[in-house]
Structures are given as structure tokens and as C-alpha cells.
Amino acid sequence: MKKRILSTIAVAGLLSLNAVNAQTYEPLPGVNKGTITNVNGIADDLKNEGIVGVGSWSSFNTLSNHMYLLEGANLKQTKMLVSKMETNIMMLDDTIPSWVDTEEIREDVADVQKEFKELIATKTDNDEYMEDLEELTEQYEDLREELKEVTMEYIETLDEANEERKDQLEKGNYEKAQEKYVKEIQELNNISENK
């Protein structure tokens, strides 16, 4: 398995400078291609790529770590790991970094919290517990998907700003290059405001 940093960028604007940092999970070529021995079904639900870490959002990063530790765990191990997730899951909404604080992310966080509450309320019925765990995993994946969309939007906007600046610098328009860059960077502030 290989984790790579998607991008680290500095965002100028209303919120001064924010570090945009997202970490992705991608398996190495040829890895995880065979049959996975799996007790609790998590390996079937977790995608092999996407956002698993966000700078300055430790509760999400810890949740991601716990979700991947569930792969292949037996029921006893699963229940032990789930019991350690509560604090981080309940802190997700209070600790969202401003650059990913969109309405869609907040909705996905609320769905993760709701599914977790249902999961921990299931004490005796193992089949129901496993169904609730699958629902939690699906909601976690939805959150990761939305994080990827927001991150890619930031990266595209930054790339456009750098391209505008580069074009103007090549023409020798240094002042105009800075103006174009600042104008494009202002769009970064609108991403979380418009979603």
C-alpha cells in the first residue's frame, strides 16, 4: 500500500493562509489483487483509493486509521476497535478544517455520526451489528468521496492561478501576473462558501 500527499498549497484570501493538505490511499500495482480473507466484510466496502487523511483534521485521520484496522478483524477485535472510535467520530463536526467545511461534508459527517450511534446501540444481535457496521463503512466512504471532490476543486483552482501567473510572467507583465494570481486565488475562498 502506498500513501501519497496529493498536494500541499498555501491559500491566500479571507482566511489568510490555510494549508491544504490531503493524503490519499492507493495500493501498489499488483497488491491486493488476490482473494482477501475477511471476517467482517469491511474489506469489501473500503475503496482502495481516495482521501484518507486531511491536514489539521486529526479526528478524521484517526477514524481513517481505525477503519482500515477493521479489515480482516474478527468480531471481538471489531467491537474493541469500534469502541475506540467514539471520541473521534463525535468530534468530526467540531474539528472540520475551514477549507473543507462545506454543506455536503457536514451532511456526510452527520451521517457517519448517526450510523455510529446506531452501531454502538446494537449490543446483542451480531447480524444486526454487522449490518450497522456496513452502513457506517458506506457513510465513511461517502465522506471520503466528498473530501476528494473538494480537494480536487482546490487543486484545479490553484493550478489555474499558477498558469495565469506563468503566462503573464512569460510576457514580462510582472504586476499583471500578481493581479491575475490574486484574483484566481480569491476563488479558493468561494469553494467552501458556495458548497
Image (cartoon, grey):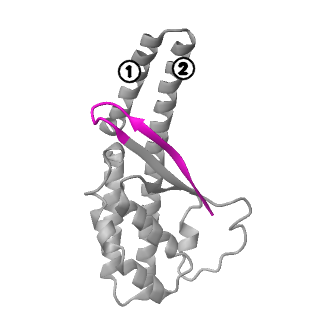
Percent of width and height locating residue 165: 49, 20
Residue occupying the far left of the picture: 94
Q: Is residue 51 above or below residue 100?
A: below
Q: Residue at x 38, y 21 (%)?
A: 183
Percent of width and height locating residue 144: 46, 55
Query: Which quadrant: the N terminus?
Result: bottom right
Q: Name the residue type under label 1.
A: Lys
Q: Residue at x 56, y 83 (%)?
A: 39
Percent of width and height locating residue 99: 35, 43
Residue linked to disc 2: 166
Which marked residue is nearer to the observer: mark 2 or mark 1? 2
Q: Which mark is residue 183?
A: 1
Q: Which residues are magenta?
A: 1-18
Q: Residues within 10 Å of mark 2 (few under 14, many from 20)?
A: some
Percent of width and height locating residue 157: 46, 31
Q: Is residue 142 left or right of residue 41?
A: left
Can residue 114 be seen here?
no
Tally of numbered tags: 2
Query: Which quadrant: the C terminus?
Result: top left
